[in-house]
Image: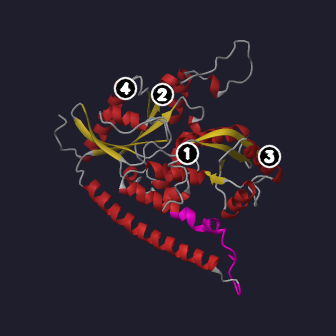
Amino acid sequence: MDEGHILVDATEERCVLVSVISGRVTEEQAIEYVDELEFLALTAGAIAEKKFFQKLAKPDNRTYVGKGKLEEIKEYVKAHDIELVIFDDELSPSQLRNIEKELELKVLDRNNLILDIFASRARTSNAKTQVELAQLQYLLPRLTRLWTHLERQKGGIGLRGPGESQIETDRRIIQDKITLLKLKLKSIDKQSATQRGNRGQLVRVALVGYTNVGKSTIMNMLSKSEVFAEDKLFATLDTTVRKVVIENLPFLLTDTVGFIRKLPHQLVQSFKSTLDEVREADLLVHILDISHPNFEDQYDVVNQTLMEIDGTDKPVIVVFNKIDAYKHIEKDEDDLSEITPENYTLEDLKKTWMAKLNNTKCIFISAIEKENLEDFKTLLYQEVKTIFQERYPYHNFLY
């Protein structure tokens, strides 16, 4: 199924990004969301030439942005040979059709872009099946735009032309394929459950966190293995499990898919099986990129997604990674304005978060610079040891 694979094989395409500031979203948030969208586009192989913002009470039902803004985008893309327009929200099938008709070039929304990155990153049979299922579910309501060259699409008496029957045929093919993929995923799930069941008495630790915070780097450092890690979004799509031994204590460490704001709901559904690893973990290690200006929002996004997957309380270690890249803005002594989070030093942040997290264990490290790693390993060892002793009080290999 190639319809969803839009950017995978592309050499770098030139694109523009479009965002509507509406509802409770502030201008700063909108800029941050679009910066993330730019990083997503770059991961998929597109370079953003310009960003368009528009303040509206709510997005336009017909074309998402207002008429004047759409004209402005149209003029810009024609003048600068832009090949692609990406919107920072999910577009309805009719909005997508109307915008493509007006701009006369390829239009993607955030969901399609994320699906595309997932498609290019999927390696195992499980991940490929999940991505294909999500793509087909996304494609189903949007089929008509692929058949606009056929006349008489509406159907009804006297209008049952080739367009109608072709769309119906395609719809049936896709629905059959969705059914098949769901069955395939069920059998893969059974295999995975058996594999997890065979892992015996070892304590399971799962690394969780927003995308691109350094989970795979920490995994490589702890397990001394080579898990693919790079400074792009969604470098990890397949769950990797490694056996790790700290001192005399063996345990299983799992690297999971990164979370992201506004993850397409088709993907949340199909990636539930990947996140079974999180559900079955005994201890979660939540990794944050402290050098990111909005790491607190990312922390909330991950916690919210974890609650959706698995509402149970699990012990958590919060790891603040990338302390080597953290920067703050010095405040002048005679500046009497209120202190903002940008003015916090690393020490201020440590105090704030240690108080905020209360009983949750937290530690500040730099995986790349290998700073505080021994303390992190000691903390991890203590937590795993506690779980192990509770579960197997008469097991004596620790002593």
Closest to the observer: 17 or 214? Answer: 17
- Image point 16% across, 40% down: which residue? 396
Find out whether the residues at labels 2 and 1 contact each other: C-beta distance under 8 Å.
no
Look at the image and give the residue range highlighted in magenta: 136-158
Q: Amino acid at mark 2?
A: Lys
Q: Amino acid at mark 4?
A: Leu
Closest to the observer: 137 or 1? Answer: 1
The answer to whether residue 149 is above or below residue 361 is below
| Residue at the spot of label 2 | 322
- Secondary element under disc 3, as helix, strand or loop, is helix
* Earlier-in-chain disc, 3 versus 1: 3
User: Label 3 to label 1, Cα distance in Å?
Assistant: 34 Å
| Residue at the spot of label 1 | 301
| Residue at the spot of label 3 | 72
| Residue at the spot of label 4 | 373
**Does 147 lie within the magenta span?**
yes
* Earlier-in-chain disc, 2 versus 1: 1
